[in-house]
Amino acid sequence: MNRESNARISVLMPIYNAERFLKTALESILSQSFSDFEIIAINDGSTDASGKILASYGDKRLRVINNDGNKGLIYTLNKGIEKANGKYIARMDADDIALPNRLAMQVEFLEAHPSIVLLGGHAEMIDEHGVPFMPMTPPLSHQAIINRIFIGSCFIHPSVMFRTDVVRELGGYRHDALHAEDYDLWLRIIQNHQVANLSAILIQYRIHPDQVSQRKMRQQRTSADRSRMQAFDVFKSAQGHHLNKIDIYNTPWRRLTGAEPSLGSDHLRWIHRYRMMGRNDLANALIIPGIFSAPLCSSLYREIFQPIRTTPAYRSLSRRIRWYRKKLYMLISGKN
């Protein structure tokens, strides 16, 4: 598809060694109920079969761009923004699944609400085998997002759709926000534009051990803290923004106790996800690093014994103890 394409949506999909899930992700977009789109699939120097998979498709809506080697996610995303023909850009990852009406719902909402620049939605977490295990429900309205976004990102990156011209004007994703480039962009958008999330589930968001957000937690936290503090100072000084009640300052005490947002709370979030996914091995591997990052966080210490609490033997023992405590209370109180 050439530069003069008039597709309304450009679906931006960066790809690096994604052969395991790439076909499923591509098919979920190609089978959308809304068909006026192009897929900008950028192969970022993959060394697996990702390139062959992309080459096997004959759909004219699929535009394949090959980077000269592995340039990284931020470079690749900005290249996609530059190449996009659509009025809107929809983000999509090569390991996730878009629900059939995702694009239709988002473009309908954005067409009806011209003041909204960035639109995300809810998601359903799935494991490596595609089994759902946990919902993701970010806040919906602009004000609800403002009230929460300085604690953590209120958008699921591969679920968002945004107006191409606005993001180009902002310069796209910033290289100095490494591993938190999406959060940094949202914080810059909300300073002068309206945003929202749909309550509908738009994607199935795949959780697996190789995700950058889990492997690069420390760098991601550093970048995210820097971006949110910069944005918060702008908001507090701007007339009409009342954020004095929001406590976002990352003091030593907050870091030591793992209060949100902090590296300790990031570890806890991933531990909880892995527990819900039924992967206690992955959860347990994050406990000690979490304790080193937040040595006074009691929740991290409790996680050490969490696998024991979920065993049938422990549950049986707990029931017996509760039964005896109840009988002892009734005996002492004279109740039958």
Image (cartoon, rainbow, N blue to C red):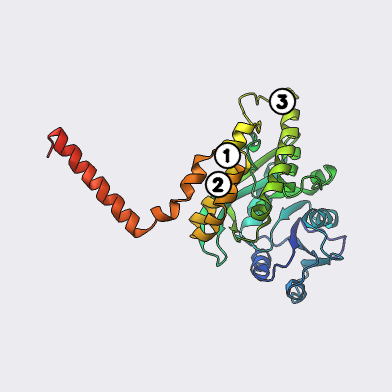
Q: Which mark is residue 71?
A: none
Q: Position of residue 172 (x, y in %)?
A: 81, 47
Q: Secondary structure at mark 3?
A: helix
Vertical order, 236 against 51 (above or below) = above
Badge 1: few (under 14), some or many (20 or more) residues near its Cα, within 10 Å?
A: many
Q: Position of residue 316 (x, y in %)?
A: 29, 55
62 vs 211, nearest the viewer: 211
Gap between marks 1 and 3 measured at Cα: 25 Å
Q: Give the mark nearest the N terminus, 3 or 2.
A: 3
Task: Quarter of the image for the N terminus: give it.
Answer: bottom right
208 vs 26, nearest the viewer: 208
Disc number lying in front (3 or 2)? 2
Disc number lying in front (1 or 3)? 1
212 vs 195, nearest the viewer: 212
Residue type at mark 1 is Gly
Badge 2: few (under 14), some or many (20 or more) residues near its Cα, within 10 Å?
A: many
Gap between marks 1 and 2 measured at Cα: 8 Å
Q: Give the mark nearest the N terminus, 1 or 3.
A: 3
Gap between marks 3 and 2 measured at Cα: 29 Å
Q: Quadrant of residue 63?
A: bottom right
Q: Secondary structure at mark 2?
A: helix
Residue type at mark 3 is Lys
- Is any atom of residue 144 visible in this view? no
Q: Are marks 1 and 2 in contact (CB under 8 Å)?
A: yes
Residue depicted at x 76% and y 51%: 88
Residue indicated by mark 2: 268
Q: Give the mark nearest the N terminus, 1 or 2.
A: 1
Q: Secondary structure at mark 1?
A: loop
* Image position of 176 (left or right of 245): right
* Image position of 316 (left or right of 94): left
Q: Which mark is residue 236?
A: 3
Q: Which mark is residue 258?
A: 1
